[in-house]
Image (tube, rainbow, N blue to C red):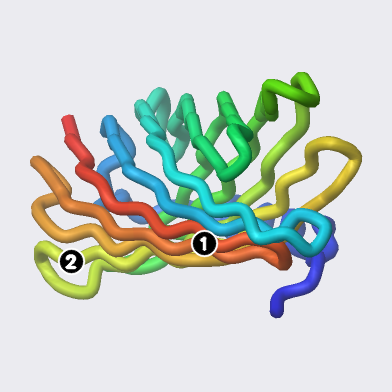
Amino acid sequence: MLKRAPLIPVLFIAAITFSHQSIASNFSYDYVEIVRLQSETDVDGFDLEGDGNAIVISKGVASNVAVFFSYQDEDFDFDIEAEAMTLGVDLYKSISDSSDIVLSVAAVQVEVSQPLVGSDDDTGNIVALELRNRLAKSVELDLFVARTDTFDDAVTSYGFELQLGSSEGIQLTLGYGKSDDSEVIGGGIRFNY
């Protein structure tokens, strides 16, 4: 299992990478993605299964910079509901004709509720490093590692997203993410514009 990674080395590597002159990116950062999620989370020895939906909207705003917004709503066992809204920025750089490296920094608002207990919310942050790889003309594989800090706890996760279809049109997506206490699988559709 991946342990909590120190943030300073990740930011140092990203700063060195983004400081050099860039190659034009061959990836779309202008898209809307709709995802169906299935998850399993361990909370104090209890396994909670959940399912839900997410939407991600991304827009390139400058050379090598995109902004994004996401909303996720998930229902778990025992009538537990979780919502998360994220607003962030992607800094990306092409490292070859078929690969981009992406540093994402975002603010996240999370709310967890259960009818008998009430609700709790928090504002935190997410820092992620992603490697986007074009394996074939219509096949993209993205690998990521992320650090999420909410509710006075920092969690490191890692995973992948496979995208099938044209990056100039519609893509089908399949993703998997894992941290110490949870696993998430998602499938969806991405509309590049």
Q: Is residue 62 left or right of residue 85?
A: left
At a point 71% along the width and 75% down the height, the residue shown is: 2
Q: Considering depth in this image, is 13 or 107 the residue closer to the camera?
A: 107
At a point 75% along the width and 21% down the height, the residue shown is: 119
Question: Which quarter of the image is occupied by the N terminus?
Answer: bottom right
Residue 164 percent location from the top left of the image: 16, 60
What residue is disc 1 on? 177
107 lies above or below 168: above
The residue type indicated by label 2 comes to: Val
What residue is disc 2 on? 139
At a point 50% along the width and 54% down the height, the residue shown is: 39
Residue 165 percent location from the top left of the image: 10, 55
In which image quadrant can residue 134 be found?
Answer: bottom left
Residue 108 percent location from the top left of the image: 66, 29
The residue type indicated by label 1 comes to: Gly
Q: Is residue 107 left or right of residue 193?
A: right
154 lies above or below 88: below
Within-10-Å neighbours for mark 1: few <14, some 14–19, many 20+: some
Q: Is residue 2 left or right of residue 87?
A: right
